[in-house]
Image (cartoon, rainbow, N blue to C red):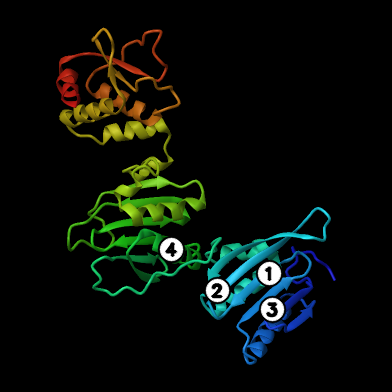
Amino acid sequence: MTDDMSNPNSARKVRFFTESGAEQVGDQQGQDSANAFWDFVAAQEKRGDQVFTFEDVVDGSGLRFDHDRGLIVRFKRFLDDDGYTQSHVSEQFTFVEDDERSRALVLAQLHDGFKGTYPLAAWSDGVPTRIPDYADDDPETREYVLSCDCGAAQRLRIRHPNETTYALRAFLVRHDGHDVFIEDPESGERLALMRGDSLIARTAGRAAGDSATGSSGRTEFMKVDLPNRYAPAASLFFAGGFAGLDRFGRWLTDIRELDLSAAAQGQLRAASLGSTAEVLSQIGRMWADSGAVDPSDRYWVFFDSSSLDEDETERAELLALLDRLGLKPAERPAEATDGEVWVLREARLDAELDRWF
Protein backbone atom coordinates (compact mmCIF):
# COMPACT_ATOMS: atom_id res chain seq x y z
CA MET A 1 0.00 0.00 0.00
CA THR A 2 1.17 3.55 -0.70
CA ASP A 3 -0.05 6.77 0.87
CA ASP A 4 1.05 8.91 -2.08
CA MET A 5 -1.98 11.19 -2.52
CA SER A 6 -0.53 12.66 -5.71
CA ASN A 7 -1.45 9.40 -7.46
CA PRO A 8 -5.26 9.26 -7.86
CA ASN A 9 -5.08 5.50 -8.45
CA SER A 10 -3.11 4.69 -5.31
CA ALA A 11 -4.79 2.58 -2.65
CA ARG A 12 -5.76 4.41 0.52
CA LYS A 13 -6.69 2.83 3.82
CA VAL A 14 -10.15 4.18 4.51
CA ARG A 15 -12.83 3.62 7.10
CA PHE A 16 -16.61 3.92 6.69
CA PHE A 17 -18.80 4.10 9.78
CA THR A 18 -22.19 5.22 11.10
CA GLU A 19 -23.40 6.63 14.40
CA SER A 20 -25.05 3.30 15.18
CA GLY A 21 -21.66 1.56 15.20
CA ALA A 22 -21.56 -0.08 11.78
CA GLU A 23 -18.04 0.02 10.35
CA GLN A 24 -16.12 -1.13 7.30
CA VAL A 25 -12.39 -0.78 6.54
CA GLY A 26 -10.79 -1.10 3.12
CA ASP A 27 -7.74 -0.21 1.06
CA GLN A 28 -9.06 -0.21 -2.48
CA GLN A 29 -8.04 2.20 -5.19
CA GLY A 30 -9.82 5.44 -6.27
CA GLN A 31 -13.18 4.70 -7.84
CA ASP A 32 -13.37 1.20 -6.31
CA SER A 33 -13.04 2.68 -2.84
CA ALA A 34 -15.69 5.30 -3.61
CA ASN A 35 -18.06 2.63 -4.93
CA ALA A 36 -17.52 0.59 -1.77
CA PHE A 37 -18.48 3.59 0.35
CA TRP A 38 -21.72 4.23 -1.55
CA ASP A 39 -22.59 0.53 -1.33
CA PHE A 40 -22.03 0.79 2.43
CA VAL A 41 -24.31 3.87 2.59
CA ALA A 42 -27.08 2.12 0.66
CA ALA A 43 -26.92 -0.93 2.89
CA GLN A 44 -26.92 1.06 6.13
CA GLU A 45 -29.74 3.33 5.01
CA LYS A 46 -31.94 0.27 4.81
CA ARG A 47 -31.12 -0.33 8.48
CA GLY A 48 -32.23 3.20 9.39
CA ASP A 49 -28.86 5.00 9.57
CA GLN A 50 -28.77 8.64 8.43
CA VAL A 51 -25.19 9.75 9.17
CA PHE A 52 -22.28 8.22 7.25
CA THR A 53 -18.58 9.01 7.59
CA PHE A 54 -15.81 8.40 5.08
CA GLU A 55 -12.38 8.79 6.69
CA ASP A 56 -8.83 8.50 5.39
CA VAL A 57 -7.10 6.53 8.14
CA VAL A 58 -3.63 7.78 7.18
CA ASP A 59 -4.12 11.56 7.36
CA GLY A 60 -7.23 11.72 9.54
CA SER A 61 -9.35 13.68 7.10
CA GLY A 62 -12.72 12.79 5.65
CA LEU A 63 -16.35 13.58 4.94
CA ARG A 64 -19.48 13.10 7.02
CA PHE A 65 -22.84 12.94 5.24
CA ASP A 66 -25.74 13.81 7.51
CA HIS A 67 -28.80 12.95 5.45
CA ASP A 68 -31.14 13.77 8.32
CA ARG A 69 -30.08 17.44 8.34
CA GLY A 70 -29.04 17.61 4.68
CA LEU A 71 -25.46 18.49 5.62
CA ILE A 72 -21.97 17.46 4.57
CA VAL A 73 -19.05 18.02 6.93
CA ARG A 74 -15.44 17.92 5.83
CA PHE A 75 -13.03 17.36 8.71
CA LYS A 76 -9.38 16.86 9.54
CA ARG A 77 -7.98 15.54 12.79
CA PHE A 78 -4.79 17.17 14.11
CA LEU A 79 -2.37 15.47 16.52
CA ASP A 80 -0.20 16.75 19.34
CA ASP A 81 3.57 16.74 19.03
CA ASP A 82 3.71 13.14 20.24
CA GLY A 83 2.08 12.08 16.97
CA TYR A 84 -0.61 10.03 18.73
CA THR A 85 -2.84 12.23 20.87
CA GLN A 86 -5.56 14.14 19.01
CA SER A 87 -5.33 17.87 19.73
CA HIS A 88 -8.33 19.14 17.78
CA VAL A 89 -10.57 18.57 14.77
CA SER A 90 -11.14 21.17 12.07
CA GLU A 91 -14.64 21.07 10.54
CA GLN A 92 -16.43 22.92 7.77
CA PHE A 93 -20.03 22.53 6.65
CA THR A 94 -22.06 22.67 3.47
CA PHE A 95 -25.47 21.47 2.32
CA VAL A 96 -26.07 18.31 0.34
CA GLU A 97 -26.75 19.62 -3.16
CA ASP A 98 -27.27 16.47 -5.23
CA ASP A 99 -25.94 12.93 -5.60
CA GLU A 100 -23.49 13.93 -8.33
CA ARG A 101 -21.88 16.58 -6.11
CA SER A 102 -21.64 14.19 -3.15
CA ARG A 103 -19.92 11.55 -5.27
CA ALA A 104 -17.50 14.13 -6.66
CA LEU A 105 -16.55 15.13 -3.11
CA VAL A 106 -15.73 11.54 -2.15
CA LEU A 107 -13.50 11.14 -5.20
CA ALA A 108 -11.78 14.46 -4.45
CA GLN A 109 -11.17 13.28 -0.88
CA LEU A 110 -9.64 10.07 -2.19
CA HIS A 111 -7.43 11.83 -4.73
CA ASP A 112 -6.29 14.94 -2.84
CA GLY A 113 -7.40 14.57 0.77
CA PHE A 114 -8.77 17.48 2.81
CA LYS A 115 -7.61 20.15 0.36
CA GLY A 116 -9.20 18.35 -2.59
CA THR A 117 -12.75 18.87 -1.35
CA TYR A 118 -12.48 22.64 -0.85
CA PRO A 119 -13.15 23.86 -4.43
CA LEU A 120 -16.21 21.64 -4.90
CA ALA A 121 -18.62 23.13 -2.36
CA ALA A 122 -19.53 26.31 -0.49
CA TRP A 123 -17.96 25.55 2.88
CA SER A 124 -18.51 27.54 6.07
CA ASP A 125 -17.00 27.24 9.54
CA GLY A 126 -20.45 26.92 11.09
CA VAL A 127 -23.65 25.27 9.94
CA PRO A 128 -24.92 27.41 7.04
CA THR A 129 -28.46 28.69 6.80
CA ARG A 130 -30.78 28.57 3.83
CA ILE A 131 -32.96 31.49 2.76
CA PRO A 132 -36.43 31.11 4.29
CA ASP A 133 -39.27 30.44 1.90
CA TYR A 134 -40.77 33.95 1.84
CA ALA A 135 -44.04 34.65 0.05
CA ASP A 136 -43.75 36.49 -3.27
CA ASP A 137 -45.94 39.30 -1.95
CA ASP A 138 -44.05 39.73 1.34
CA PRO A 139 -43.54 43.53 1.50
CA GLU A 140 -40.35 43.18 3.60
CA THR A 141 -38.51 41.16 0.97
CA ARG A 142 -36.53 42.04 -2.10
CA GLU A 143 -35.89 39.81 -5.10
CA TYR A 144 -32.60 39.25 -6.86
CA VAL A 145 -31.71 37.08 -9.83
CA LEU A 146 -28.48 35.11 -10.05
CA SER A 147 -27.52 33.97 -13.53
CA CYS A 148 -24.46 32.86 -15.43
CA ASP A 149 -23.27 32.80 -19.01
CA CYS A 150 -23.95 29.07 -19.14
CA GLY A 151 -27.69 29.81 -19.02
CA ALA A 152 -28.42 28.81 -15.41
CA ALA A 153 -30.50 31.15 -13.27
CA GLN A 154 -31.78 31.27 -9.70
CA ARG A 155 -34.13 33.71 -7.98
CA LEU A 156 -33.46 34.82 -4.40
CA ARG A 157 -36.10 36.50 -2.24
CA ILE A 158 -34.57 37.88 0.95
CA ARG A 159 -35.25 40.12 3.90
CA HIS A 160 -31.63 40.65 4.92
CA PRO A 161 -28.43 40.63 2.83
CA ASN A 162 -26.80 38.07 5.14
CA GLU A 163 -29.35 35.51 4.00
CA THR A 164 -27.62 35.31 0.62
CA THR A 165 -24.26 34.05 1.94
CA TYR A 166 -24.68 30.33 1.28
CA ALA A 167 -26.85 30.63 -1.83
CA LEU A 168 -24.35 32.96 -3.49
CA ARG A 169 -21.28 30.89 -2.66
CA ALA A 170 -23.01 27.69 -3.77
CA PHE A 171 -23.97 29.30 -7.09
CA LEU A 172 -20.39 30.48 -7.64
CA VAL A 173 -19.01 27.02 -6.91
CA ARG A 174 -21.65 25.24 -8.98
CA HIS A 175 -20.82 27.41 -11.98
CA ASP A 176 -17.08 27.68 -11.49
CA GLY A 177 -15.36 28.92 -14.63
CA HIS A 178 -18.37 30.95 -15.75
CA ASP A 179 -19.23 34.63 -15.41
CA VAL A 180 -21.98 35.22 -12.83
CA PHE A 181 -24.47 38.10 -12.82
CA ILE A 182 -26.59 39.48 -9.97
CA GLU A 183 -29.51 41.69 -10.88
CA ASP A 184 -31.97 43.66 -8.80
CA PRO A 185 -35.06 43.72 -11.05
CA GLU A 186 -36.71 46.47 -8.99
CA SER A 187 -33.90 49.01 -9.41
CA GLY A 188 -32.33 47.62 -12.55
CA GLU A 189 -28.92 47.61 -10.88
CA ARG A 190 -26.58 44.81 -11.85
CA LEU A 191 -23.27 43.30 -10.80
CA ALA A 192 -21.20 41.13 -13.14
CA LEU A 193 -18.52 38.84 -11.70
CA MET A 194 -16.45 38.28 -14.85
CA ARG A 195 -14.19 35.57 -13.51
CA GLY A 196 -12.73 34.61 -16.86
CA ASP A 197 -11.34 38.13 -17.29
CA SER A 198 -10.60 38.88 -13.60
CA LEU A 199 -13.09 41.76 -13.69
CA ILE A 200 -16.06 43.08 -11.78
CA ALA A 201 -18.57 45.36 -13.49
CA ARG A 202 -21.38 47.27 -11.81
CA THR A 203 -24.27 48.84 -13.69
CA ALA A 204 -26.42 51.63 -12.31
CA GLY A 205 -30.21 51.47 -12.40
CA ARG A 206 -31.97 51.33 -15.74
CA ALA A 207 -35.17 52.98 -16.86
CA ALA A 208 -38.21 50.73 -17.04
CA GLY A 209 -38.29 48.68 -20.19
CA ASP A 210 -34.56 48.60 -20.81
CA SER A 211 -32.98 45.32 -21.79
CA ALA A 212 -31.82 42.87 -19.15
CA THR A 213 -28.20 43.64 -20.02
CA GLY A 214 -28.52 47.10 -18.51
CA SER A 215 -26.85 48.57 -21.58
CA SER A 216 -28.42 51.97 -21.06
CA GLY A 217 -27.23 52.22 -17.43
CA ARG A 218 -23.83 53.56 -16.41
CA THR A 219 -21.34 50.70 -16.16
CA GLU A 220 -18.06 50.82 -14.28
CA PHE A 221 -15.28 48.26 -14.18
CA MET A 222 -12.65 47.05 -11.74
CA LYS A 223 -9.74 44.62 -12.05
CA VAL A 224 -9.77 41.81 -9.48
CA ASP A 225 -6.40 40.54 -8.30
CA LEU A 226 -7.63 37.60 -6.20
CA PRO A 227 -10.55 35.15 -6.67
CA ASN A 228 -11.71 35.71 -3.10
CA ARG A 229 -12.73 39.28 -3.98
CA TYR A 230 -15.86 38.22 -5.88
CA ALA A 231 -17.98 37.07 -2.93
CA PRO A 232 -17.31 40.23 -0.82
CA ALA A 233 -18.24 42.40 -3.81
CA ALA A 234 -21.49 40.50 -4.21
CA SER A 235 -22.27 40.85 -0.49
CA LEU A 236 -21.82 44.62 -0.69
CA PHE A 237 -24.10 44.72 -3.73
CA PHE A 238 -26.83 42.83 -1.87
CA ALA A 239 -26.45 45.23 1.08
CA GLY A 240 -26.24 48.54 -0.76
CA GLY A 241 -26.65 48.04 -4.49
CA PHE A 242 -24.52 50.03 -6.93
CA ALA A 243 -23.60 52.67 -4.34
CA GLY A 244 -22.69 50.00 -1.79
CA LEU A 245 -19.58 49.24 -3.84
CA ASP A 246 -18.29 52.82 -3.95
CA ARG A 247 -15.47 52.12 -1.49
CA PHE A 248 -14.68 48.59 -2.69
CA GLY A 249 -11.92 49.86 -4.95
CA ARG A 250 -11.17 52.07 -7.89
CA TRP A 251 -13.87 51.95 -10.56
CA LEU A 252 -13.20 52.86 -14.19
CA THR A 253 -15.87 53.98 -16.64
CA ASP A 254 -13.91 53.01 -19.74
CA ILE A 255 -12.98 49.34 -19.95
CA ARG A 256 -10.02 50.29 -22.15
CA GLU A 257 -8.38 51.89 -19.13
CA LEU A 258 -7.97 48.60 -17.29
CA ASP A 259 -4.80 47.55 -19.09
CA LEU A 260 -3.30 51.03 -19.45
CA SER A 261 -0.63 52.62 -17.31
CA ALA A 262 -1.77 55.20 -14.78
CA ALA A 263 -0.52 58.02 -17.03
CA ALA A 264 -2.33 56.64 -20.07
CA GLN A 265 -5.54 56.20 -18.06
CA GLY A 266 -5.45 59.84 -17.00
CA GLN A 267 -4.83 61.06 -20.54
CA LEU A 268 -7.69 58.94 -21.88
CA ARG A 269 -10.07 60.37 -19.29
CA ALA A 270 -9.06 63.91 -20.15
CA ALA A 271 -9.54 63.24 -23.85
CA SER A 272 -13.07 61.94 -23.22
CA LEU A 273 -14.30 65.39 -22.14
CA GLY A 274 -15.68 67.54 -24.92
CA SER A 275 -16.20 71.20 -24.07
CA THR A 276 -14.11 73.68 -22.14
CA ALA A 277 -16.93 73.87 -19.59
CA GLU A 278 -16.63 70.11 -18.97
CA VAL A 279 -12.86 70.41 -18.61
CA LEU A 280 -13.19 73.20 -16.05
CA SER A 281 -15.89 71.34 -14.15
CA GLN A 282 -13.72 68.23 -13.87
CA ILE A 283 -10.75 70.32 -12.68
CA GLY A 284 -13.05 71.82 -10.07
CA ARG A 285 -14.13 68.38 -8.83
CA MET A 286 -10.53 67.26 -8.59
CA TRP A 287 -9.54 70.31 -6.61
CA ALA A 288 -12.51 69.88 -4.27
CA ASP A 289 -11.40 66.30 -3.53
CA SER A 290 -7.81 67.05 -2.52
CA GLY A 291 -6.97 70.68 -3.12
CA ALA A 292 -5.98 73.76 -1.18
CA VAL A 293 -5.06 77.42 -1.71
CA ASP A 294 -1.47 78.31 -0.92
CA PRO A 295 -0.85 80.78 1.94
CA SER A 296 0.07 83.55 -0.50
CA ASP A 297 -3.30 83.12 -2.26
CA ARG A 298 -1.50 83.07 -5.64
CA TYR A 299 -1.81 79.37 -6.49
CA TRP A 300 -4.37 76.62 -6.61
CA VAL A 301 -2.81 73.49 -5.05
CA PHE A 302 -3.96 70.06 -6.19
CA PHE A 303 -3.25 66.76 -4.38
CA ASP A 304 -2.33 68.54 -1.20
CA SER A 305 0.35 66.64 0.77
CA SER A 306 0.37 63.73 -1.70
CA SER A 307 3.42 61.80 -2.86
CA LEU A 308 4.14 60.85 -6.47
CA ASP A 309 3.05 57.28 -5.73
CA GLU A 310 -0.44 58.49 -4.84
CA ASP A 311 -3.15 59.64 -7.26
CA GLU A 312 -1.05 58.82 -10.34
CA THR A 313 -3.96 58.54 -12.73
CA GLU A 314 -5.71 61.64 -11.42
CA ARG A 315 -2.47 63.63 -11.65
CA ALA A 316 -1.97 62.59 -15.27
CA GLU A 317 -5.59 63.52 -16.00
CA LEU A 318 -5.17 66.94 -14.40
CA LEU A 319 -2.01 67.71 -16.36
CA ALA A 320 -3.77 66.74 -19.60
CA LEU A 321 -6.78 68.90 -18.72
CA LEU A 322 -4.58 71.87 -17.90
CA ASP A 323 -2.82 71.41 -21.22
CA ARG A 324 -6.18 71.63 -23.00
CA LEU A 325 -6.63 75.02 -21.36
CA GLY A 326 -3.15 76.11 -22.39
CA LEU A 327 -1.95 76.09 -18.76
CA LYS A 328 1.23 74.65 -17.27
CA PRO A 329 1.90 73.72 -13.63
CA ALA A 330 4.01 76.19 -11.71
CA GLU A 331 7.22 75.22 -9.99
CA ARG A 332 6.50 73.84 -6.52
CA PRO A 333 8.10 75.54 -3.52
CA ALA A 334 10.76 73.51 -1.72
CA GLU A 335 8.47 72.69 1.20
CA ALA A 336 5.74 71.15 -1.02
CA THR A 337 5.46 67.37 -1.33
CA ASP A 338 6.53 65.87 -4.65
CA GLY A 339 3.01 64.80 -5.58
CA GLU A 340 1.41 68.23 -5.35
CA VAL A 341 0.53 70.20 -8.47
CA TRP A 342 0.62 74.01 -8.15
CA VAL A 343 -1.19 76.13 -10.73
CA LEU A 344 -1.04 79.93 -10.91
CA ARG A 345 -4.44 81.48 -10.37
CA GLU A 346 -6.15 82.81 -13.48
CA ALA A 347 -9.65 84.00 -14.36
CA ARG A 348 -11.15 80.77 -15.73
CA LEU A 349 -9.89 78.61 -12.88
CA ASP A 350 -10.84 81.20 -10.29
CA ALA A 351 -14.41 81.36 -11.58
CA GLU A 352 -14.77 77.57 -11.54
CA LEU A 353 -12.93 76.66 -8.36
CA ASP A 354 -14.63 79.39 -6.33
CA ARG A 355 -17.84 77.40 -6.90
CA TRP A 356 -16.36 74.42 -4.99
CA PHE A 357 -15.63 76.16 -1.70
Instruction: Indicate which label's residue lies in the foreground, 3 or 2.
Output: 2
Along the polypeptide, which appears first: circle 3 or circle 1?
3
Disc 4 secondary structure class: helix
Disc 1 secondary structure class: strand
Q: Residue at x 40, y 46 (%)?
A: 222
Residue 190 coordinates in the image, percent (x, y): 31, 57
Q: Which disc number belongs to residue 62?
A: 1
Along the polypeptide, which appears first: circle 3 or circle 4?
3
Along the polypeptide, which appears first: circle 3 or circle 2?
3
Q: Residue at x 37, y 52 (%)?
A: 236
Q: Which disc number belongs to residue 34?
A: 3
What is the three-letter code of the residue carrying label 3? Answer: Ala
Q: Nearer the viewer, residue 333 or 170?
A: 170
What is the three-letter code of the residue carrying label 4? Answer: Leu
Residue 116 coordinates in the image, percent (x, y): 65, 64
Q: Nearer the viewer, residue 46 or 182?
A: 46
Q: CA distance from mark 2 to mark 4?
A: 17 Å
Q: Which disc number belongs to residue 71?
A: 2
Dot 2, how many residues are within 10 Å of its Cα: few (below 14), some (14-19), or many (20+)? some
Q: Nearer the viewer, residue 116 or 239?
A: 239
> With 165 as the anchor, is 191 left or right in this view?
left
Residue 52 coordinates in the image, percent (x, y): 65, 79
Along the polypeptide, which appears first: circle 2 or circle 4?
2
